[in-house]
């Protein structure tokens, strides 16, 4: 791009009207919040135009311009609405100044070919905006609960004290409740006891079976596969109903063993799928070479095959673990009060007595899932690199 | 393989140890197969026991109905002779009342009549209280008249030992069939109380049956009996004609006059077989009445509505997942790998986050005092008095479930779109297609398999969802699965829960089969 001179952007006929529009929209929001919508809209439009003109003609350095505008608006926010206004000011200042540079320097055309018509450029940017909004929809709900979990009040929403960044508005009391309340501690203990046991069963049996299934001649391969995958396909409520009926017949309902068995069954499809996928890229001649040099099948398995498929086994195990750790429908029916797990406790909490401790637990779980996701992603990259499938 | 036929002169090819090559290959192949199966076997066995058996048990429970024929077996047999014709049926004969008398006398001891009552109450309301009431009254019937009359005739009738000796004599079941059958119930009752049979005087229902047997049997048959207590029996046989008779029908009507209602008897008869389609009929808003299959009363027809709503809302969720997932998958597949891997994390993070975390997040956001409403009020777009109702209705369920299931749409779509070569669209454009034509006629058709795979996956997952509708669905946003859970844990109508589950399972398996045909179960990928 830098080789070509960028098409000149018409400041007066293109940038300023758009900036007036953006400023008016911001001004409307700020004005409405202070019950002077019309005044806010007009002032906002004037601010937008003035800012864009100043930045475009007098401040060529983008970084300095954005910084200056942000500070300026933050001070403005402080004057209008006190400490809480700073956040609003920072947001408004940053967005307006960034938008101004984006428009006036012509960066909005980046990503479209030089010959694109203005309609195409408009569509391109609209599309990016839509995608951004969808990503926002995906992530925002999860991120919202994190600050809320530090709420000093027993509310499920942002208090004025939180919005004005008053330290009084924040506290760790919900975390303290989680770590001291015997109900939650018992639930955590149960979860930590059930999930690893279930994972161990599904990983050990599942890995063996996946190796068996990846042999060239397996009779009834499709039927066996269908049976092994079925716990993932059958709706949880049906699995839960069936297990409840059957386990109460054989006396496993309401026992630790029953819950572990049920969760192991639910985790098996994930182990089968990930390990089979890893085995697809496994070089069979390695085991033959090992056998040729005198290793017995067990040695071959542990010394040659296992290290190579380990990433797949571990990520299958993580899937099985998270399945059990997250599972609530089956444990609701198969378990009894003695097997109350963390998700179960959250479920009852959400349904009956809503307490913000749930948000603290949710935040902890989000952190755990970020860690798990990172591990799985690293393992996947490593396994692809080992198999030479990935360019990077 | 064809060597042998092509060169018959040299004979079959032999392997090193002298066996024909074909045979030793077969042996090797079989050994390989067995080894593969041996590796799979433990897991297969585990899944069969811990998962497939429960599902089979559920299927079985959806038709099983042994409780009626187990609790009141004699009544069921006696009712075979009786015809129900739309309320105008002949009143049941005294034989049927007698059979019910013995059956309930035993059931009352084991308290199984209450279970029978709850079972039949699903079909005809009032059965539960009727049976409880009858269970309480059955020991206080006037049938002690028979006992007194027998005792007055010969005090030895009071002696349990005499009874035991008599009932053990060979041939007694032929001349006193009802008494012998009732005696078996008596034996079970005594055993249940941990008493000794020879020390407990039989209850009134034994004497009642003895009376009925003696009346029914010709004197010659009694005279032919020569076992223990033969003289007592012959003496009694000649005296019973003078006994005061008690109408069992009147006794039952005294407890509750509903026992005269043919509807009650019709229900018992309709549900007397050990297997019933009744639960399945209830699942589709029909009912099995004594007169045949009829639609449920208008105000009780909820299951078709729930199935319809489950289907409709799953469709809406699937549609919004396509709408939101398609642009994202398109963007991801057209960006450089480094950027798209980074953005993919934004898709995978919700995928890995606990379902309950996401549901609670939506509860926090959508409720009336929640974050979204607060922002709208703060901005002045909505007045504080009429905050939007976005939760505990269909809207809440659809939004939350779209968010939860969106990754399941994006990931298959992305993996399909990654394989579409960009040169096709470029070729279309260079041949003069507009952007829209190039997309719609060239790119979109190639991405349809991804849409198909994602849609079926999302649909299968959403029609069986329980947790999210339960927490954010209120009353109008719940699915059929919530009803199943209700029947398992609250109304305890397990048969109906099993039948609803079976129907849901059938729908899912059908979709699974379609998915298998389109995508293949081996190609399921997990991010």
Image (cartoon, helix red, strand yellow):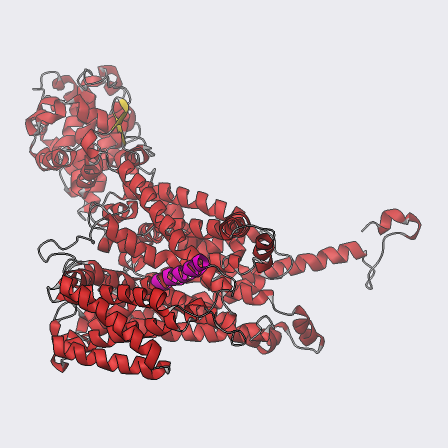
Q: Is residue B70 above or below residue B329?
A: above
Which quadrant of the figure contains the C terminus of chain A?
bottom right
- Farthest residue toward the right? B9
Main secondary structure type of the part rendered in magenta? helix
Identified at 20% across, 61% down, the residue is B372
Q: Is residue B306 above or below residue A137?
A: above
Using residue B44 as the reference point, say whether residue A242 is left or right of it.
Answer: left
Residue A156 visible in image:
no
Nearer to me, A153 or A117: A117
Location of residue A331 (image quadrant) = bottom left
Location of residue A341 (image quadrant) = bottom left
Identify the magenta region: A118-133
Nearer to me, A59 or B519: A59
Identified at 18% across, 32% down, the residue is B299
Percent x, y for residue B108?
Answer: 16, 39
Q: Is residue B231 above or below residue B12?
A: above
Magenta stretch encompasses residue B476 = no
Magenta stretch encompasses residue A121 = yes
Nearer to me, B29 or B448: B448
Nearer to me, A131 or B296: A131
Residue A49 visible in image:
yes
Identified at 17% across, 52% down, the residue is B389
Percent x, y for residue B431?
Answer: 61, 51
- Farthest residue toward the front? A12
């Amino acid at each position: 791009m830098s080789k070509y001179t960028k098409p000149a952007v018409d400041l007066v006929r293109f940038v300023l009207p758009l900036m007036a529009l953006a400023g008016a929209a911001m001004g409307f929001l700020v004005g409405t919040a202070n019950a002077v919508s019309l005044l806010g809209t007009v002032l906002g439009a004037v601010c937008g135009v003035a800012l864009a003109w100043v930045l475009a003609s007098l401040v060529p350095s983008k970084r300095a311009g954005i910084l200056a505008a942000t500070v300026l608006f933050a001070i403005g926010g402080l004057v209008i609405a006190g400490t809480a206004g700073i956040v609003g000011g920072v947001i408004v200042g940053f967005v307006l100044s960034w938008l101004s540079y984006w428009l006036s320097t012509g960066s909005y055309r980046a990503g479209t070919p030089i010959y694109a018509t203005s309609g195409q450029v408009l569509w391109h940017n609209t599309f990016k905006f839509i995608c951004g909004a969808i990503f926002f929809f995906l992530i925002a709900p999860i991120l919202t609960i994190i600050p809320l979990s530090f709420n000093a009040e027993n509310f499920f929403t942002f208090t004025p004290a939180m919005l004005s960044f008053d330290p009084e508005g924040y506290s760790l009391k919900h975390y303290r409740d989680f770590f001291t309340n015997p109900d939650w501690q018992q639930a955590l203990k149960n979860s930590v006891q059930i999930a690893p046991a279930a994972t161990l069963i599904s990983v050990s049996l599942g890995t063996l079976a996946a190796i068996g299934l990846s042999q060239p001649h397996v009779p009834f391969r499709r039927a066996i596969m269908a049976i092994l995958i079925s716990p993932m396909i059958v709706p949880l409520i049906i699995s839960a109903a069936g297990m409840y009926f059957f386990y109460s017949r054989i006396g496993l309902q309401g026992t630790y063993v029953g819950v572990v068995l049920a969760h192991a069954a639910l985790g098996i499809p994930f182990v089968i799928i990930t390990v089979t996928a890893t085995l697809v890229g496994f070089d069979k001649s390695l085991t033959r070479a090992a056998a040729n040099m005198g290793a017995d099948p067990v040695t071959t398995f542990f010394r040659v095959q296992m290290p190579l498929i380990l990433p797949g086994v571990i990520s299958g195990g993580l899937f099985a673990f998270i399945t059990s750790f997250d599972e609530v429908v089956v444990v609701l029916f198969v378990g009894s009060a003695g097997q109350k797990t963390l998700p179960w406790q959250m479920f009852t909490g959400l349904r009956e007595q809503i307490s913000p401790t749930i948000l603290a637990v949710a935040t902890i779980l989000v952190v755990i899932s970020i860690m798990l996701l990172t591990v799985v992603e690293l393992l996947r990259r490593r396994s692809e690199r080992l198999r030479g499938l990935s360019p990077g | 393989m064809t060597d042998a036929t092509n060169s018959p002169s040299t004979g079959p090819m032999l392997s090193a140890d002298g066996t024909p090559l074909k045979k030793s290959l077969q042996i090797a192949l079989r050994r390989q197969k067995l080894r593969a199966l041996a590796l799979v076997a433990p897991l297969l066995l585990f899944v069969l026991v811990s998962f497939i058996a429960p599902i089979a048990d559920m299927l079985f429970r959806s038709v099983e109905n042994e409780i009626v024929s187990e609790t009141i077996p004699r009544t069921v047999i006696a009712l075979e002779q009786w015809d129900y014709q739309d309320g105008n049926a002949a009143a049941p004969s005294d034989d049927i009342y007698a059979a019910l008398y013995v059956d309930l006398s035993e059931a009352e001891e084991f308290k199984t009549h209450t279970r029978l009552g709850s079972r039949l109450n699903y079909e005809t309301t009032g059965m539960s209280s009727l049976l409880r009431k009858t269970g309480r009254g059955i020991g206080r019937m006037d049938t002690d008249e028979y006992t007194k009359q027998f005792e007055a005739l010969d005090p030895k009738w009071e002696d349990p030992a005499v009874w035991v000796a008599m009932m053990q004599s060979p041939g007694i079941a032929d001349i006193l069939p009802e008494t012998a059958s009732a005696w078996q119930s008596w034996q079970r009752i005594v055993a249940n109380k941990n008493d000794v049979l020879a020390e407990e005087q039989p209850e009134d229902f034994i004497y009642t049956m003895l009376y009925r047997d003696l009346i029914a049997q010709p004197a010659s048959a009694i005279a032919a009996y020569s076992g223990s207590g033969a003289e007592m029996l012959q003496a009694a046989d000649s005296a019973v004609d003078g006994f005061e008779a008690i109408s069992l029908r009147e006794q039952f009507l005294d407890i509750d006059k509903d026992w005269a209602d043919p509807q009650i008897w019709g229900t018992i008869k309709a549900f007397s077989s050990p297997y019933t389609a009744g639960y399945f009929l209830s699942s589709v808003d029909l009912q099995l009445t004594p007169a045949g299959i009829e639609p449920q009363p208008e105000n009780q027809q909820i299951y078709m509505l729930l199935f319809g709503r489950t289907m409709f809302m799953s469709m809406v969720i699937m549609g919004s997942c396509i709408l939101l997932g398609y642009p994202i998958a398109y963007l991801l597949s057209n960006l450089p790998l480094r950027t798209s891997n980074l953005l993919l994390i934004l898709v995978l993070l919700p995928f890995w986050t606990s379902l309950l975390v996401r549901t609670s997040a939506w509860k926090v956001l959508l409720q009336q005092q929640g974050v979204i409403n607060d922002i709208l009020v703060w901005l002045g777009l909505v007045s504080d008095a009429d905050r939007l109702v976005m939760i505990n209705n269909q809207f809440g369920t659809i939004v939350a479930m779209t968010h939860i299931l969106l990754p399941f749409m994006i990931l298959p779509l992305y993996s399909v779109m990654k394989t579409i070569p960009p040169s096709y669209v470029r070729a279309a454009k260079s041949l003069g297609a507009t952007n829209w034509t190039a997309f719609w006629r060239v790119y979109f058709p190639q991405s349809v398999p991804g849409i198909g795979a994602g849609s079926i996956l999302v649909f299968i997952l959403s029609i069986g969802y329980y947790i999210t509708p339960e927490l954010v669905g209120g009353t109008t946003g719940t699915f059929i699965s919530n009803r199943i859970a209700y029947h398992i844990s609250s109304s305890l109508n397990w048969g109906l829960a099993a039948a609803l589950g079976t129907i849901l399972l059938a729908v899912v398996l059908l979709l699974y089969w379609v998915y298998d045909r389109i995508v293949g179960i081996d190609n399921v990928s997990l991010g």
